[in-house]
Image (cartoon, helix red, strand yellow):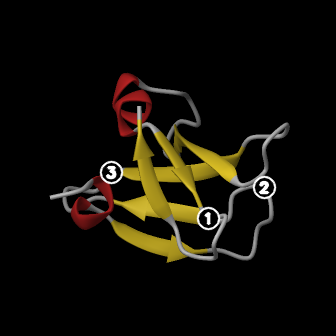
Amino acid sequence: MGVLDRYTVIKTEDEKFPYELHGPRGARYALMRNVPNPHMLFAVNARSFTASSTAQRLGWFTDKDGTLKALGR
């Protein structure tokens, strides 16, 4: 089971935070674009807007080909 299988992916209209991940127990993470590499995204805790250890364990994501994919750590 991959990272994206455990979370509901929500597409947003925000260019800086184009996706949200919602966990089954209420966790929420916003995927933020990396400025030097805009096709790369990383998770930040959407409840407190910090890079929690859980968000760091989620690793990197990409939507370079139009589909969100987890790249891992």
Q: Position of residue 69 (x, y in %)?
A: 46, 62
Q: Position of residue 31 (x, y in %)?
A: 58, 52
As rendered, which of 1 and 26 lies closer to the eye? 1
**For mark 2, what is the residue?**
16
Residue drawn at point x = 23 percent, y = 56 percent: 2
Query: In the rendered view, does 10 fall on the left or right side of 12?
Result: left
**For mark 1, what is the residue?**
63
**For mark 3, what is the residue?**
27
* CA distance separating discs 3 and 1: 22 Å
What's under tag 3, amino acid-wise?
Answer: Ala
Against 30, is 44 above or below? above
Total labels drawn? 3
Query: In the rendered view, does 7 fall on the left or right side of 17?
Result: left
Asked whether the residues under the numbered discs 3 and 2 touch, taking CB atoms below 8 Å apart as contact, a structural biologist would say: no
Q: Residue furthest front?
A: 65
Against 37, is 14 above or below? below
As rendered, which of 62 and 22 lies closer to the eye? 62
As rendered, which of 25 and 16 lies closer to the eye? 16
Against 55, is 70 above or below? below
